[in-house]
Amino acid sequence: MSSTPTKDYVYQHITRILQEQFDLDPASMTPETDLRADLDIDSIDAVNILIELKSLTSKKVAIENFHQIKTIGDLTDAVFNLLNEDGQ
Amino acid sequence: MLLLDRAWRVAATGFSFALFGMGALMLGIFLGADLVLVRARPATKIRVARRVIGLLCAMYIRTLRGLGLLTYQCDDFTQLDCRGKLIIANHPTLLDAVFLMALIPNATFVAKAAMTRHFFTGAIARLAGYIANDQDGVALLEGAKQALARGDALVIFPEGTRTTDAAPKFKRGAANIAVATGCNIVPVRISCEPPTLRKNQKWYDVPPRKPHFVFRVLAEITLSQVIDTERPVGIQARQLNDYLQDCLTQVVPAGDLPANLPLGV
C-alpha cells in the first residue's frame, strides 16, 4: 500500500498551515492564490511554512528555490513532487 | 529679507550635500586604508569606523545648525541604553540616519541597499558593518541576530525608505527580528516641521522657513506587553508590525504608548 498523500491532501494540509500560522481565512485561498501578493507571505514566513511541512514527511522539507514558487498551487505541486521522489 | 534667507539656505544646502558626499568618500578611503595598514581585526575596524562616523555626523549636524539650515531637539538620548535592543524609527527626511548615527553609539544600521553600494557612502557603510536591506529575509535575520547578540543597538527604519505622501506601510523585517530574538524595542519618533528633504523632494527645494527636528524616544517595548507570545511566530510578527506602525505613525502624546494595543495594556 502506498503511503504517499494525494495532491488534494497536500493542498488541504498547506491551507491548514497557512490558516494556523498566519491567521488567514481558508475561504480566501485557492490554488491560484499568490503567496506574496495576496497573502503577504515573506521569506521568513516561507521558512516557517517549510518547518511546518515536516509533519507530512519524516524529514525536513527542503525546497531549494522558494522564490520560484508563486501560488499555493505551485507550493502544493512542489511538495507533492518531493513526497513522490521520497517514496520512490 | 525672506528671499535672501531662502537663497542663503539653498546655497548652504548645496554646500552641505557636497560636504557630506566628499566627507563620506574621503572617510571611507582613508579610514579603510588606515585600518588595513594597521591590520586591525574585523571587530576593531567596525568599532573604530562607527566611532568616527558618530563623531563626524555630530559635527556635521552642528555645522548645519551653524549654517542656519535647521534646529533640533534630541534630549532623550542622553540616558538611553540601547545595547542589544532594536531601535525603530519613522523616516520623514534624508537626515534621520545622520542624526541617529550621531546619537546612538555602536549601532548596526539596516541601511538602504543603494546606500551601501553608493559611490560616496558605500565604502564607509561597509566598513561600519551595516546590513543592506535588500538581503534575503533569512540572511538579514541572521545578520540582525548576530548584531544583537554582540550587544549592538540595531537600528531599522521599518518603512524601508523615506516617508511619501501615501500612508506609510511598515515592512515586517523589524517585527520578524524582534519576534525571533525576543529583544526589547525602543521606538524613536522623528518629526520635522516644516518638512524638508523628503522622498522625491529636490535638495534645492528648501522649506519656507528653517526646519526644526525633534527626536523623541518613546517607552521601551517588551514583546509580552504588546503581543501574545504563545501564538505562532507568523501571527506574532504581523501583530507586532501593526503595533509598531501605529506607535510611530499615530499622533499620540510623546512618550506614551498608543491605546490600541492588540492585547490592551
Image (cartoon, rainbow, N blue to C red):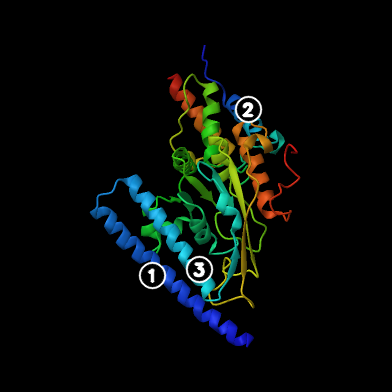
Q: Quadrant of the C terminus of chain A?
A: top left
Label ID, residue A60: none
Give the Cα distance between marks 3 and 2: 61 Å
Residues indicated by labels 3 and 1 sit on the same polypeptide chain: yes
Q: Quadrant of residue B72?
A: bottom right
In the displayed structure, does residue B31 sit left or right of residue A23? left
Q: Which residue is mark 1?
A: B22
- Percent across and percent down for residue B179 are 58, 36
- Residue drawn at x 57%, y 64% is B93
- Residue drawn at x 66%, y 61% is B166
Give the Cα distance between marks 2 and 1: 58 Å
For numbered disc 3, what is the local secondary structure?
A: helix
Please say whether residue B90 is visible from this viewpoint: no
Please say whether residue B162 is visible from this viewpoint: yes
Residue mark closest to the camera, 3 vs 2: 3
**Is A78 above or below relative to A43?**
above
- Residue drawn at x 68%, y 51% is B255
Q: Which residue is mark 2?
A: A12
- Percent across and percent down for residue B212 are 62, 68
Q: Which residue is mark 3?
A: B62
- Percent across and percent down for residue B109 are 48, 51
In the displayed structure, does residue B228 sit left or right of residue B114? right
Residues indicated by labels 3 and 2 sit on the same polypeptide chain: no
For numbered disc 2, what is the local secondary structure?
A: helix
Residue mark closest to the camera, 2 vs 1: 1
Question: B8 or A65: nearer the eye?
Answer: B8
The chain holding disc 1 is B
